[in-house]
Image (spheres, rainbow, N blue to C red):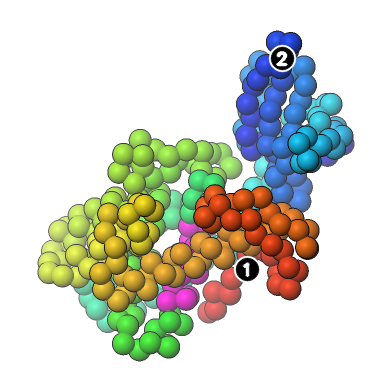
Amino acid sequence: MSYAMIKELTEKKDKNGNGYLDLIVIGSDKKEYPAKIWKFENNGQFEADDVVEIEYTVDTFKGKTQLKISSIKKAPDEMIKDFVPTSEYSGKAVFANLLAKVNAFKDSELKAIVSTILTENREKLEVYPAAFKLHHAVVGGLMLHTASIVEMAEKTCQVYPNINRELLLSGAILHDVAKTFEMETRKTGLCKNYSVGGELIGHLVKGAMYVEETAKKLGVSGEKATLLEHMILSHHGEPEYGSPVRPMFLEAAVLSALDGLDATVFEISNATSQVKVGEFTDRQWALDNRKLYNHGLSATEYKVNLGE
């Protein structure tokens, strides 16, 4: 007998018309496993995010491991915290650190815009994941991803002192701020789907709208707001990745590169952690449909050092 959390659940029929459940479950090791419950009519008993107690055997289908569940029942709701992937850093602590950086800015216009947007969205920013299924799709992942980029931005400015540090940090802190508008979360704190506004507008455009609206409210005029809007709109780099414009000045280009780097490190680490040393992953569509190799020479777990 083991405990698991249902991540995805689909009710299907086999070729004989018998109902069965096609599942993806998260085990106590935080890894995902495909699973089946044959000859089973759900009738609303189980749904995604339920923590369950199961009996199972390990089966193989088309060369891949899956669980064949023979017994299932609900476990206490409070066990959900044991199965939800969560940032190693407290979202509240990371938020406070970022806000302190902003409050120390010498540029009063950037300070006003960024601090206002942060504080107005604080509650969601502290806990939201950074994505639905891709990089940093964990509770507190949005702050972790943002802080990782800010940390890299600080180091980059030490190497290239011609970069405007406060402008780069402002763009880094705000680049994904509208993810809280774009996504809706489940009881686990993870994303369950995109909001209507998220589908129709998206976080890049909405983030730029936040800057424009905030600048008007604060009476900030001139180029500063426009520069921030451009950094948010261009941070995906290419039109095929959702950016309506490509980065057109230094800080925007650096932000786009750092955003891509952090996402890539997370995706590769997450994918290779699912296979043994000496094995290849399945093709990863988020990484140009590449298979990835676990060479065993580095830790596959995504880890960051946010410093002080």
Q: Secondary structure at mark 2?
A: loop
Q: Earlier in the sequence, mark 2 or mark 1?
A: 2
Q: Is residue 26 magenta?
A: no
| 135 in relation to 196, above or below | below
* Horizontal side of residue 200 vs 307, given as left or right: left
Q: Which residues are magenta?
A: 138-153
Q: Secondary structure at mark 1?
A: loop
Whether pointer 2 and pointer 1 mark residues with C-beta atoms closer than 8 Å, the reply is: no
Quadrant location of residue 247? Answer: bottom left
Residue projecting furthest to the top = 17
Quadrant location of residue 220? Answer: bottom left
Q: Is residue 152 magenta?
A: yes
Quadrant of the rendering where the N terminus is positioned: top right
Residue that badge 1 annotates? 303
Q: What amino acid is labelled 2 in the image?
A: Lys
> Can residue 144 be seen?
no
Residue that badge 2 annotates? 15
> Which mark is nearer the camera, 2 or 1?
2
